[in-house]
Image: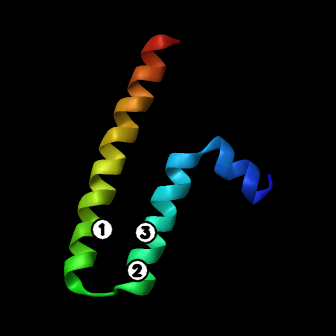
């Protein structure tokens, strides 16, 4: 799958990945690391809810 195709199919995941990469590479300090950990936890929580909703609809 080409990168552009992936971006079109998964825009949220693409943006989250870019955000993670930017936080780690451009601003490697403790405050940003803590924010990244919080964002990651929130992302996992939302993805679990989405998966649960998809499973209930099938």
Q: Position of residue 28 (x, y in %)?
A: 33, 87
Cα distance between the residues tagged 3 and 2: 6 Å
Residue positioned 30% across, 68% down in the render: 36
Q: Are marks 3 and 1 in contact (CB under 8 Å)?
A: yes
Q: Are marks 1 and 2 in contact (CB under 8 Å)?
A: yes
Q: Secondary structure at mark 2?
A: helix
Label placed on residue 20? 3
- Image position of 7 (left or right of 13): right
Q: Position of residue 7 (x, y in %)?
A: 65, 51
- The residue carrying pointer 1 sits among few (fewer than 14), some (14 to 19) or many (20 or more) residues within 10 Å by Cα, namely some
Give the mark, 1 or 2, whose residue is nearer the N terminus.
2
- Image position of 35 (left or right of 3): left
Report which quarter residue 14 is drawn in.
bottom right
Observer-nearest residue: 45 or 35? 35
- The residue carrying pointer 3 sits among few (fewer than 14), some (14 to 19) or many (20 or more) residues within 10 Å by Cα, namely some
Label placed on residue 36? 1
Q: Secondary structure at mark 1?
A: helix
In the rendered view, tell whether residue 36 sits above or below residue 32: above
Give the farthest residue toward the right.
2
Observer-nearest residue: 16 or 52? 16
Report which quarter residue 34 is drawn in.
bottom left
Label placed on residue 24? 2
In the rendered view, tell whether residue 14 sits above or below residue 19: above
Q: Secondary structure at mark 3?
A: helix
Give the mark, 3 or 1, whose residue is nearer the N terminus.
3
């Amino acid at each position: 799958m080409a990168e552009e195709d992936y971006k079109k199919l998964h825009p949220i995941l693409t943006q989250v990945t870019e955000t993670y990469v930017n936080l780690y590479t451009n601003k490697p300090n403790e405050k940003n690391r803590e924010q990244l950990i919080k964002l990651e936890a929130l992302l996992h929580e939302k993805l679990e809810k989405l998966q649960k909703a998809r499973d209930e609809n099938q």
